[in-house]
Every structure is written in structure tokens, then in C-alpha cells.
Amino acid sequence: MISIIVNNKKYEVDVEPEKPLLWVLREELELLGTKFGCGFGICGACTVHIDGEPQQCCVITIGEVVGRRITTIEGLNDRVGQCLKNQWVENSVPQCGYCQPGFIMSAAALIYRGFVNEESIRELPNICRCGTYQRVKKAIYTTAD
Ligand code: FES
């Protein structure tokens, strides 16, 4: 059994330590907001926070996160998280919606760091095939104001 803390809750899961965190979240914990896109740490669809830092969890094993604090889109419910989710709705950001949880997790990390500007938003490691980037930017700026 491996013990992990996700969204402030402790879970015991019976998996190999090499199993990617993404698949533990989705298959064992049924937290389906974290998406699979590329599986190579490139697209950002699987972004979660580990000890407050944004990470692509398709390339992190569960063995690497024992004892660390994992937050998924389902648990991003602090003031910044709520405000971002509201702004995503207000600005009709999603099109197909698939990549958006990862975008919100990356955006929250930017705001926590107080590091919101054109360049930092452009450099977010999230790819959206629908091209929602302008609406993403607006939602981030409104939340950060
Ligand atoms: Fe993890 Fe693409 S699925 S970065």
C-alpha cells in the first residue's frame, strides 16, 4: 500500500510505485478533472500542484510524491481557485474544455507567485487545440487584479 495526500485527504492505494500519478488520480481515486493529453510532460493537460508547485503528473510516479501535498482541480477551492473558476465561466473560456483544468492549475500557480504578465502567461506550459488563449489571458488578468 502507498499512502498519498490529495486535496487534504489521505488515501491508501495498492499500486506499484512506478505508476504515474496521473493514472493513480484518475483510476484509483476517480479524480477525473486531471486529463491525459500527451503523456510526455509537454501539453499541460495533467497539471496538478505538488507542494504548491505546478507539475505535469503524467511524468511523475506515485512513488515520488509520497508525503507531499497534491492538489488537483477538484481541490483548488481557495479564493484564487474559486475566482479563476468563476472567471473561466464569466469569460466563456472553454471551447471543448479538455485542456482547461490544467490551464487553471497553471494559472493559479502564476497568481500565487504574483507573477502575472504577458510573458509569463504566454509561457504557460499548456496547449489548447481550440485556441482559447486570449480568453485564458483575460480570465487570468481579471483574477489577478
Ligand atoms: Fe501530461 Fe501532456 S498529459 S503533459
Image (tube, rainbow, N blue to C red):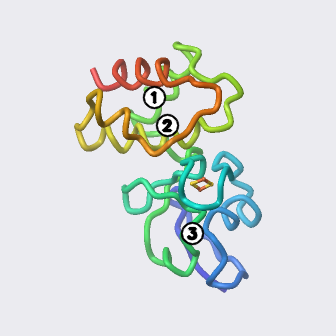
- Check contact, mark 1 vs mark 2: CB within 8 A: yes
Image depth: mark 3 or mark 1 in front: 1
The mark that comes first in sequence, 1 or 2, is 1
x, y percentage for residue 63? 55, 81
What's the residue at 42%, 53% (across, down)? 54
Quadrant of the drawing holding the N terminus = bottom right
Quadrant of the drawing holding the C terminus = top left
Q: Which residue is mark 1?
A: 84
Residue type pointed to by label 3: Lys
Q: Which mark is residue 104?
A: 2
Q: Which residue is mark 3?
A: 10
- For the residue carrying disc 1, how many other residues have a C-alpha within 10 Å: few (<14), some (14-19), or many (20+)? many
x, y percentage for residue 59? 56, 67
Q: Ligand 1: give its quadrant.
A: bottom right
Residue type pointed to by label 1: Leu
The mark that comes first in sequence, 2 or 3, is 3
- Mark 1 lies on a secondary structure that is helix
x, y percentage for residue 131? 58, 25
Image depth: mark 2 or mark 3 in front: 2
